[in-house]
Image (spheres, rainbow, N blue to C red):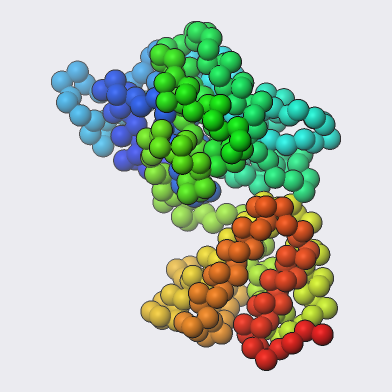
Amino acid sequence: MKFSEIEGNKEIKRQLIQTVLDQRVSHAQLFYGPEESDKLALAIAYAQFINCTGRKLPPPTAQRLSPDDEVDSCGICPSCVKYQKLVHPDLHFIFPISTTKKVTKNPQSKHFITEWRNFLTESNFHGGLQRWYEAMGIENKQGIINRDDCNEIITTLSYKSYESDYKVMILYMVEKLFYAAAPRILKILEEPPDKTLFILISEEPDQIIRTILSRTLMVRIPRSDVARRAPAEDESVHFLTMRDWLRHCYAARIPALLSFSTEITRGGREKQKSFLIYVLKIIGQCATVNYRGLLPPGAEGEELDFFQKFPPLIPSDKLIAFNSLFNDAIYHIERNAHGPTLFLDLSLKLVQQFKPNFVPL
C-alpha cells in the first residue's frame, strides 16, 4: 500500500512522511478514527514507506515537505513488493479472534492470517470489525486479543528483523485487548527492542486500557472526503430496520417487537452493537433537527420523510433518557447479555418513552 493509493488525508500523510524524513518515528503510535477512516491503510502505507529501499524523496534543498512534493514508497523494491502482498517477514499483525469451526481451541492470530490477508485486500482495508468476524467465521461471538497473542508479540519481537530496518507490529482494534492479558505487553510496548514500531488501530480509544493508551502517541485519522461521500453499506439496512422498529415502538405493537427482538440478534453481537450505535447517531441528528431546524445533508426519499416526521417525537426532556437507554444496551451487549431479552426490554422501555401510561401485559 502506497500513500498515493489512499485518497484524501493529505495533511496526515505529509506528517507521517515527515517523521520518517526527520528520523523521529515514535516507537508506539495509536491510529484512531471512525470505521470509514483510512487508519489501517495509512498504517500499512507508513510501515511500507519506512522500510522502502527506493523512496521517492523531496529535493535535497527542501527543509520541509510541501503539499506538492511527491514523496512515497517506490512500490517496486523487494520490500515494497512483499508489503503490497502483506507477506513481508518483518510485518506482523495481531487482531481480535475467537474459536471457530476451523480453530476449535487456543486460537491465535497466526491461525487466521490467510483469512486476514484476503479480508484486507477484498475490503480495500475498510472492512470494519463486523465484516472481519464474518470473514473469520465467527458466528454469534465477540473476538478478543488474548493472552496467547500477547505472548506471541513478545516472542516475535525478541528476534532480530529478517531483512528490513524496522520490525512492524500492527494491533488491529486494540480496544479488544483482554484486560487480564494487557500487563504482558506493557514493558515491551514502553521499551521495545531497537528499530521496532508498534501501530495500534482503534475506533473507540476511550475503551482502551489506560496503561496501554498512556504509552502511545495518538494520531487521529478523520474520515476522508471520499469516505464522507460514500456511506457505509450497512447504513441503508440499518435505517430501514430502525425506522420499522421505532414505528412498532411508537404504536406499541408488542407481537412485532417480539419478532424484532429475535430477528435482530441473529447477526452476532458486533452487528447488534453497530445497529445501536447507528440509532444513537440518528437520535443525535433528530436533536439537531429539533434545535436548529437543519435536516441531515443528503437526506432524501424515505430518509428525508423520516427526519421530517420523527424528531418531534423526541423532545428535549426525553433526549437524555433515549441516549441512556441505548448506551446501557450497548454496555450490556459488550458483556454478553442475552440478545432477545435485552432488545425486548429496550423496546418496551422505548414504548414507555413514547406512551408514558403504557403498561405491558
| For residue 285, side relative to residue 131 (left or right) | left
Q: Which corner quadrant of the image does residue 84 belong to?
A: top right
Residue drawn 67% across the image and 77% down it: 349
Residue drawn 79% across the image and 36% down it: 100
Residue 246 in the image, given as x and y percentages of width and height: 66, 76
| For residue 292, side relative to residue 300 (left or right) | left
Q: Would residue 13 be seen by someone viewing this image from the given angle?
A: yes
The vertical placement of 200 against 80, above or below, is below
Residue 145 in the image, given as x and y percentages of width and height: 63, 34
The vertical placement of 331 against 46, above or below, is below
Front-most of residues 5 and 92: 92
Residue drawn 77% across the image and 59% down it: 338
The vertical placement of 277 against 81, above or below, is below
Q: Which corner quadrant of the image does residue 99 belong to?
A: top right
Front-most of residues 179 and 146: 179
| For residue 96, side relative to residue 304 (left or right) | right
Q: Would residue 120 be seen by someone viewing this image from the given angle?
A: no
Residue 311 in the image, given as x and y percentages of width and height: 52, 81
Q: Residue furthest bottom?
A: 357
Q: In which quarter of the image is the C terminus?
A: bottom right
| For residue 27, side relative to residue 98 (left or right) | left
Front-most of residues 49 and 267: 267
Residue drawn 34% across the image and 24% down it: 25
